[in-house]
Amino acid sequence: MTRLRMAILISGRGSNMQAILDAAEAPDYPAEPVLVLSNRPEAAGLNLAQRRDVATACVDHRAYGKDRAAFERQMHQVLVPHHVQLIVLAGFMRVLTPWFVDQWAGHIINIHPSLLPKYPGLKTHQRALEAGDDEAGCSVHWVTAGVDEGAVIAQARVPIAAGETAEQLAGKVLLAEHKLYPQAIKHACEAIVAREKAVQL
Ligand code: GRF
């Protein structure tokens, strides 16, 4: 079985990355982690990946000031030699420009802590509580140039309890993310493989 070569992009603690690395240990998992790339050298997830013998790299966005294009060109340069077939954004906190998204179109996915199309952007849990919603959740979606706008691959729902705080809700949703993301990656891999087969017909 061919496994797709997967890069995981992070900015911080990397708990979703860990869940994905755990899942990818199964021999029949359809993606192989070939690189963990961070835009912050201090991201805790980098150490976790190194301890698991996954190659890591850092492109510090702060070194590029406001030049997002230069930052993304450098990330692209780092990704290409690893022959990446799937980019998984896992708590990667930079908005990507249309140029970068275009380079990897159909090969980038993201996890977002809301039931999209509800609450794109930040402070999703607070917004769900303020709206009086009775459920929250997370979505894995294809990345397009519009922030949190691409087609949804999979979602998980969690009930909101009376009196729950945004932090408590975030903790519950995060546990759902850890289950959802490894599963959604399987679907993304199937879609990529099916697409590439179709192109060859
Ligand atoms: C997750 O809640 C994810 O949905 C959001 O950022 C958080 C990342 O957490 N985009 P972690 O770094 O995976 O622990």
Image (cartoon, rainbow, N blue to C red):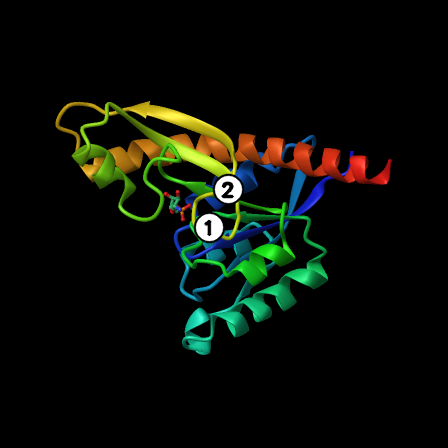
Q: Determine the residue positioned at 25% across, 33% down.
A: 169
Residue 76 is drawn in which quadrant? bottom right
Is residue 26 left or right of 95 when viewed as pictured? right
Q: What percent of the width, then of the height, locates residue 73?
A: 59, 69
Q: What percent of the width, then of the height, locates residue 165?
A: 17, 35
The amino acid on which the numbered mark 1 sits, given as a three-letter code, is Gly
Q: Which residue lies furthest to the left in this view?
A: 163
Q: In this view, does 11 lie above or below 150?
A: below
Is residue 155 left or right of 77 when viewed as pictured? left
Q: What percent of the width, then of the height, locates residue 179?
A: 46, 30
Q: In which quarter of the image is ligand 1?
A: top left
Q: How crowded is mark 2: few (under 14 residues within 10 Å), some or many (20 or more)?
A: some
The amino acid on which the numbered mark 2 sits, given as a three-letter code, is Gly
Q: Is mark 1 within 8 Å of ligand 1?
A: no
Q: Which of the numbered marks, if any, corresponds to residue 150?
A: 2
Label 1: state its secondary structure. Answer: loop
